[in-house]
Image (cartoon, coloured by chain):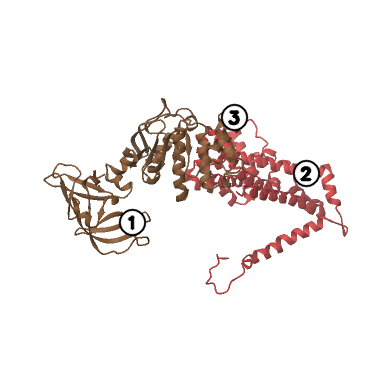
Chain colours: A red, B brown
């Protein structure tokens, strides 16, 4: 408590500072979530696990859950593969350009996700920029390609949105690695590549982990991109939307969102474990 | 350990754009010797070491180790050892894994690695600490592990980059002796970079004093200290009183700061020379009157420093400052007193050295 200036006339308890934010969170986040999960356990006025049993045993619903996780994993892996070299360049080679690169990375996040997704539609539509270029201007193809509503475009759009999170997570950790550790490894006979594998990569694992969990969680809950770009994916967020608008089965929607929440919480828990282990 | 190699820097130069960090520097380290590159920050000593290590490529010149020109070799193929100021132990590996790292890179068997680790831990007196992580060790212990990690590979040359800079003073002193003893026992050619003159004096066979990308003077510690060739060397190693003046017609004396100073050897009359006198060579009191160079001085300050007393004196019409160190020999507890009084100071001509203005 030595941080508080001793001359302060009346000491304000520290927790007062976060009270407004806390009240806001409770009213608009915690209570609705509790209400939502209560609804998932209620069938005809009584407590029941029926919906969970149905969701976790029915092969169709299980398929949806698996597909959600597989899609998110794929997006995460691609983000890591693309993001690591970018982060490495940013920290080690960009020099005075690093500020510009960080800006370029973050800039897409400043536009609404809907605008960005429509951008992908404009680019890849049947008579969009890419097809026009390939067919009319360059004459490489005879007829336009079916690009929209393919899994590839949906994954590309998700990666586009999420890769900055991966880059920034990894760059933060890379920044903290003392380059003399790498020089030390080289003096001990490790080639540059060996040094990367033995020293740089293990020491930046926490950055990859943090980025991966972040990307995975956001990809898991991604909705707009998949609605607008399709790709034939059947993921939990799309199903929840369907339950609300088409089937009007609110109870089932609540159950699915609770499962989504549990997956997210598991991720957060893993991240905390990771950070604690690394807390040297 | 097998015989260590000589290190030879042949006219090496390093330019960073318009800035030259190292200017055509040549240096030889005899096998088994320890040479210190000593100088203020920015003098090019670290750049020189990094060129030997292979992290910087010389703009010109050659680096030869033993009879091999290594100028173009990458660091990992030079077979050198290096110890950094911040130890640079791998935080994600145990002490034993740190020591075994180089052996593993060289493809040595597990049993060989384990044997060597045990041997090295014994050598640095940290037996039984193999399973600990570097962060669980003290700074001095980490530095010993860093040494062991380098020495286990039997490097041709050991490079020490301000190796004790992060340790506190008392530990630094004992580590200076410890590293020096180990270096001599193993007979390993060593290049030490430091800005700490005491460290350089304690550990080296030879000191190369650097300034502005060049070696100003190289020699044994006593030689550098007692026979500095330039004003910079005299002032960087220890403290020096520098007197500048024009040599009188006799060639034996010069006038400076209101006193007549006897030169240690004859110089062409009319030349402008600088004379360096170490504070511990300056006599204070009535005995000073008998010295060939002497004058009246006013005591401006006295500081008790334990083993000696540093006197801050003023001489001549412009109150020029002169330092004198007097051994602490008075009554216990009586050090560091009276200022303002007048006294005689003086020194023997052979206790002074003529230096260049550089």
Seen from the viewer's position, the closer of residues B64 and A220 is B64
- CB within 8 Å, label 2 to label 3: no
In three-dimensional space, the C-alpha distance between marks 3 and 1, rounded to whole angstroms, equals: 58 Å
Asked whether, in this view, residue A59 is left or right of residue A164, the answer is: right
Q: What element carries label 1?
A: loop
Q: Is residue B312 above or below residue B85?
A: below
Q: Position of residue B158 (x, y in %)?
A: 45, 35
- What chain does mark 2 sit on? A
* Residue indicated by mark 2: A64
In three-dimensional space, the C-alpha distance between marks 2 and 3, rounded to whole angstroms, equals: 54 Å
Task: Classify residue B350 by image quadrant.
Answer: top left
* Residue indicated by mark 3: B112
Q: Which of marks 2 and 1 is in front?
A: 1
Q: Where is residue B263 in the image (x, y as percent from the top left)?
A: 19, 46
Residue B329 is labelled as 1
Q: Quadrant of the C terminus of chain B?
A: top left
- CB within 8 Å, label 2 to label 1: no
Q: Position of residue A270 (x, y in %)?
A: 69, 48
Judge the density around disc 3: few (<14), some (14-19), many (≥20) Cα neighbours within 10 Å.
few
Q: In this view, does B16 lie above or below A255?
A: above
For marks 3 and 1, the one nearer the N-term is 3
Seen from the viewer's position, the closer of residues A144 and B349 is B349
Q: Is residue A43 above or below residue B153?
A: below
Judge the density around disc 1: few (<14), some (14-19), many (≥20) Cα neighbours within 10 Å.
few
Q: Nearer the viewer, mark 2 or mark 3?
A: 3
Q: What element carries label 3?
A: helix
Q: Is mark 2 on a helix, strand or loop?
A: helix
Same chain? Circles 2 and 1: no
- CB within 8 Å, label 3 to label 1: no
Seen from the viewer's position, the closer of residues B199 and B161 is B199
Seen from the viewer's position, the closer of residues A109 and B237 is B237
């Amino acid at each position: 408590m030595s941080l508080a200036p001793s001359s302060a006339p009346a000491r304000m308890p520290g927790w007062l500072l976060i009270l407004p934010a806390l009240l806001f969170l409770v009213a608009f986040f915690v209570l609705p979530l509790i209400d939502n999960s209560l609804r998932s356990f209620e069938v005809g006025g009584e407590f029941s696990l029926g919906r969970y049993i149905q969701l976790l045993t029915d092969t169709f619903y299980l398929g949806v859950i698996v597909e959600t996780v597989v899609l998110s994993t794929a997006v995460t892996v691609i983000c890591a593969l693309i993001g690591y070299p970018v982060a490495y360049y940013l920290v080690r080679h960009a020099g005075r350009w690093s500020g510009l690169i960080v800006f370029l990375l973050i800039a897409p996040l400043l536009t609404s996700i809907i605008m960005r997704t429509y951008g992908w539609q404009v680019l890849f539509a049947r008579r969009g920029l890419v097809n026009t270029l390939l067919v009319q201007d360059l004459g490489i193809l005879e007829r336009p390609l079916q690009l929209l509503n393919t899994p590839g475009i949906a994954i590309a759009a998700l990666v586009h949105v999420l890769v900055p999170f991966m880059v920034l997570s990894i760059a933060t950790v890379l920044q903290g690695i003392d380059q003399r550790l790498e020089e030390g490894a080289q003096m001990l006979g490790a080639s540059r590549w060996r040094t990367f594998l033995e020293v740089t990569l293990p020491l930046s694992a926490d950055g990859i982990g943090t980025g991966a969990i972040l990307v995975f969680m956001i990809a898991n809950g991604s909705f707009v991109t998949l609605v607008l770009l399709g790709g034939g994916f059947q993921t939990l967020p799309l199903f929840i939307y369907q339950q609300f608008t088409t089937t009007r089965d609110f109870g089932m929607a609540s159950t699915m969102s609770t499962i989504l929440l549990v997956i997210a919480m598991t991720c957060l828990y893993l991240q905390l474990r990771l950070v604690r282990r690394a807390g040297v | 350990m097998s015989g260590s190699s000589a290190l030879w820097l042949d006219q090496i130069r390093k330019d960073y754009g318009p800035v030259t960090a190292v200017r055509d520097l040549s240096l030889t380290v005899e096998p088994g010797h320890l040479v210190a590159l000593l100088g203020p920050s920015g003098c090019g000593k670290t750049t020189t070491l990094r060129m030997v290590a292979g992290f910087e490529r010389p703009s010109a010149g050659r680096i030869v180790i033993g009879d091999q020109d290594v100028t173009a070799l990458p660091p990992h193929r030079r077979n050198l050892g290096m110890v950094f100021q911040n130890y640079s132990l791998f935080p994600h590996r145990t002490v034993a894994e740190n020591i075994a790292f180089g052996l593993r890179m060289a493809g040595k068997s597990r049993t060989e690695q384990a044997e060597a680790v045990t041997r090295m831990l014994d050598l640095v007196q940290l037996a039984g600490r193999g399973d600990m992580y570097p962060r669980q060790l003290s700074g001095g212990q980490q530095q010993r592990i860093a040494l062991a990690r380098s020495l286990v590979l039997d490097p041709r040359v050991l490079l020490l980059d301000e190796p004790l800079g992060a340790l506190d003073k008392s530990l630094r002193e004992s580590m200076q002796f410890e590293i020096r003893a180990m270096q001599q026992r193993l007979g390993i050619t060593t290049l030490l970079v430091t800005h700490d003159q005491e460290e350089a004096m304690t550990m080296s066979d030879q000191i190369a004093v650097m300034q502005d990308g060049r070696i100003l003077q190289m020699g044994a510690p006593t030689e550098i200290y007692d026979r500095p060739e330039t004003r910079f060397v005299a002032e960087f190693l220890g403290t020096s009183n520098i007197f500048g003046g024009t040599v009188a017609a006799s060639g034996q004396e010069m006038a400076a700061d209101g006193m007549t100073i006897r030169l240690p050897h004859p110089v062409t009359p009319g030349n402008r020379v600088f004379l360096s006198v170490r504070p511990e060579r300056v006599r204070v009191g009535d005995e000073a009157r008998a010295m060939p160079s002497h004058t009246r001085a006013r005591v401006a300050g006295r500081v008790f420093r334990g083993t000696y007393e540093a006197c801050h004196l003023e001489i001549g019409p412009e109150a020029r400052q002169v330092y004198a160190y007097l051994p602490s020999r008075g009554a216990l507890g009586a050090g560091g007193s009276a200022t303002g009084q007048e006294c005689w100071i003086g020194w023997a001509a052979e206790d002074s050295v003529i230096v260049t203005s550089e």
